[in-house]
Image (cartoon, helix red, strand yellow):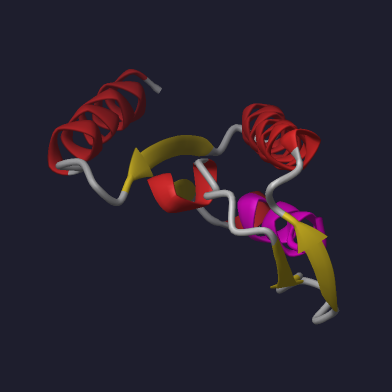
């Protein structure tokens, strides 16, 4: 993705935390038939058949691939990565992350 290069530059000079916020509506697309779908990164709009079984499977696979790439990038660059759902209480996950970070900073 286009954001890896700037993130890499930031990570060299700053202490970063990447937080991925998910929405269940993005993960479980409804079967709506043929609809326009806009790619936010390219700005292009394509007509997609959301009723096709492989469409939802392909979208889910692409999302999983992007998440894995982001996790791998974060690990490689030693950036903390956290994934939270918009529907959940994210505070416990944030507290846990910052406790782990605090311990790591004290022991360094």
Pick whichever, 34 or 103, lies toward us.
Answer: 34
Question: Residue 50: where, in percent of width, then height?
Answer: 69, 52
State whether residue 16 appears in this view: yes
Identity of the residue drawn at 81% across and 55% down = 1
Q: Which residue is rendered at x = 33% and y = 18% of the image? A: 107
Which region of the structure is painted magenta? 1-11
Which residue is depicted at the point 76% across and 70% down?
A: 39
Instruction: Find residue 5 and report its horizontal and vertical position in percent.
Output: 81, 59
Residue toward you, 19 or 36:
36
Does residue 20 appear left or right of residue 72 in this picture?
Answer: left
Per the picture, the main secondary structure of the magenta-coloured stretch is helix
Q: Quadrant of residue 79?
A: top right
Position of residue 78 relative to residue 13, above or below, is above
Q: Is residue 22 visible?
A: no
On screen, 6 above or below 16?
A: below
Image vertical order of residue 106 relative to residue 35, above or below = above
Q: Quadrant of residue 66?
A: top right
Image quadrant occupied by the C terminus = top left
User: Total marks drawn?
Assistant: 0
Residue name at image x 48 percent, y 36 percent: 80
Q: Is residue 97 left or right of residue 15?
A: left
> Residue 3 occupies which quadrant of the picture?
bottom right
Furthest-top residue in view? 107
Q: Is residue 40 magenta?
A: no
């Amino acid at each position: 993705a286009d954001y890896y290069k700037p993130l890499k530059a930031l990570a060299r000079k700053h202490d970063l935390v990447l937080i991925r916020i998910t929405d269940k509506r993005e993960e479980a697309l409804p079967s709506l038939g043929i609809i326009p779908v806009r790619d936010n990164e390219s700005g292009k709009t394509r007509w997609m058949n959301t009723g096709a079984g492989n469409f939802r499977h392909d979208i889910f696979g692409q999302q999983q691939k992007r998440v894995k790439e982001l996790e791998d990038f974060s690990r490689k660059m030693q950036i903390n990565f956290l994934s939270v759902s918009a529907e959940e209480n994210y505070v416990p996950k944030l507290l846990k992350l910052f406790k782990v970070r605090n311990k790591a900073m004290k022991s360094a």
